[in-house]
């Protein structure tokens, strides 16, 4: 929630004061710190006469809002977005409905060549949202900010998977991210004990291509079958060209490294090379982890995968591949892929 009191919140504060609530209680109800509420109550302090013509001091939202607008005007120029309704509505739609970040919204406008009378930088747009300028968008609508983990999440490690090739032996070109075809693989699961299905997620390291596949369960056999289906659809040679390497963690669903590496058509020649991260080292699959956060904008933790149709999963995959990424200089994965290869 933003640091500043919005006009709507001022009317809420006025109602709470009429109900006899004190500043600490109002702070909890409105979601602000106590000092902010004390400051706001002082800003809207107004003298009135009661029915017996006795003077009393009350908090009025209208008075507080008027003082706020006067102070804001005195500080400098008017808001650039003030008269551009179409621009404001587009921002609200892209953040609220399309789940874009402020950076992605502005980059998407640039990528598509959309024309508005107003243009702002990312910092200014964040400031407007923080100040409650937009009618339907606030900080609660923005992608969740990363919080430092107090304790590392420990997942079940496949101790039998000791013969899989360690990430330490992965070729240097994978780390450079300059060659297409090196992927990271993970699963996105629903609530434990309530959802059998999960998603197999593959993220390409250089261009951030994303592939999302529904799995019936979180077993190694399901993972291998999913890769077999892709090999049959693409053809063995094409599969080898696209999936040069796949890096994954030591989860039980990735136990069968031979099944992952061995082609379903030619058992003698590998279709890809599998590499395994160190236990409890999710940062070694950073691309995967970041992309999973994008998926969680549509499938929050606790949601059952069974509740999402194949069409919805395809929409999420397409959305991610068309989403402007700062790491790609504002381009999407699809835009990056369409760029001509330079010699």
Image (cartoon, rainbow, N blue to C red):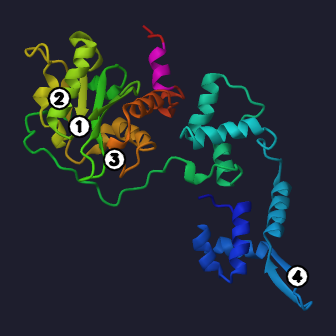
**Distance (Cα) linking label 2 and label 3:** 22 Å
Provide the residue designation for mark 2.
224
Q: Which badge, 4 or 1, comes first in the chain's sequence?
A: 4
- Secondary structure found at label 2: helix
Residue under the point 40% across and 56% down = 148
Could you tell me residue 259's position as x and y percent? 12, 27
Q: Residues within 10 Å of mark 4 (few under 14, many from 20)?
A: few
Q: Residue furthest right?
A: 53
Q: Which badge, 3 or 1, comes first in the chain's sequence?
A: 1
**Distance (Cα) linking label 4 and label 2:** 75 Å
User: Is residue 140 located in the magenta-colored stretch of the structure?
Assistant: no
* Residue 328 located left or right of residue 170: right
- Secondary structure found at label 1: loop
Provide the residue designation for mark 4.
48
Q: Which badge, 1 or 2, comes first in the chain's sequence?
A: 1
Residue under the point 13% across and 21% down = 262
Q: Which residues are magenta?
A: 332-339
Of tags 1 and 2, the one toward the viewer is 1
Residue under the point 52% across and 25% down = 331
User: Is residue 335 located in the magenta-colored stretch of the structure?
Assistant: yes
């Amino acid at each position: 929630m933003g640091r500043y009191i919005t006009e709507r919140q001022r009317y809420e504060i006025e109602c709470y004061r009429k109900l006899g609530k004190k500043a600490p209680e109002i702070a909890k109800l409105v979601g602000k710190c106590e000092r902010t509420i004390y400051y706001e109550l002082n800003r809207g302090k107004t003298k009135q006469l009661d029915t017996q013509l006795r003077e009393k001091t009350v908090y009025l939202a209208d008075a507080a809002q008027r003082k706020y607008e006067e102070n804001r005007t005195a500080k400098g120029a008017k808001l650039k977005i003030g008269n551009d309704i179409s621009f404001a509505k587009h921002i609200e739609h892209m953040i609220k409905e399309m789940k874009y970040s402020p950076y992605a919204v502005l980059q998407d406008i640039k990528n598509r060549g959309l024309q508005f009378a107003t243009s702002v930088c990312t910092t200014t747009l964040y400031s407007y949202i923080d100040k409650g300028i937009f009618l339907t968008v606030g900080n609660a609508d923005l992608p969740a900010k990363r919080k430092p983990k107090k304790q590392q999440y420990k997942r079940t490690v496949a101790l039998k998977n000791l013969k899989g090739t360690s990430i330490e032996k992965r070729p240097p070109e994978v780390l450079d991210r300059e060659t297409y075809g090196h992927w990271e693989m993970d699963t996105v699961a629903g609530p434990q004990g309530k959802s059998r299905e999960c998603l197999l997620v593959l993220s390409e390291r250089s261009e951030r291509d994303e592939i999302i596949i529904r799995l019936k369960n979180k077993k190694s056999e399901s993972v291998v079958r999913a890769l077999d289906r892709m090999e049959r659809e693409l053809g063995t040679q094409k599969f080898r060209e696209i999936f040069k390497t796949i890096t994954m963690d030591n989860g039980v669903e990735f136990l069968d490294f031979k099944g992952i590496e061995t082609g379903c058509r030619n058992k003698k020649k590998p279709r890809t090379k599998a590499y395994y991260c160190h236990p409890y080292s999710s940062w070694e699959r950073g691309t995967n982890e970041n992309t999973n956060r994008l998926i969680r904008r549509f499938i929050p933790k606790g949601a059952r995968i069974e509740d999402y149709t194949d069409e919805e999963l395809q929409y999420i995959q397409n959305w991610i591949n068309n989403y402007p990424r700062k790491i790609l200089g504002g381009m999407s994965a699809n835009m990056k892929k369409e760029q001509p290869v330079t010699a």
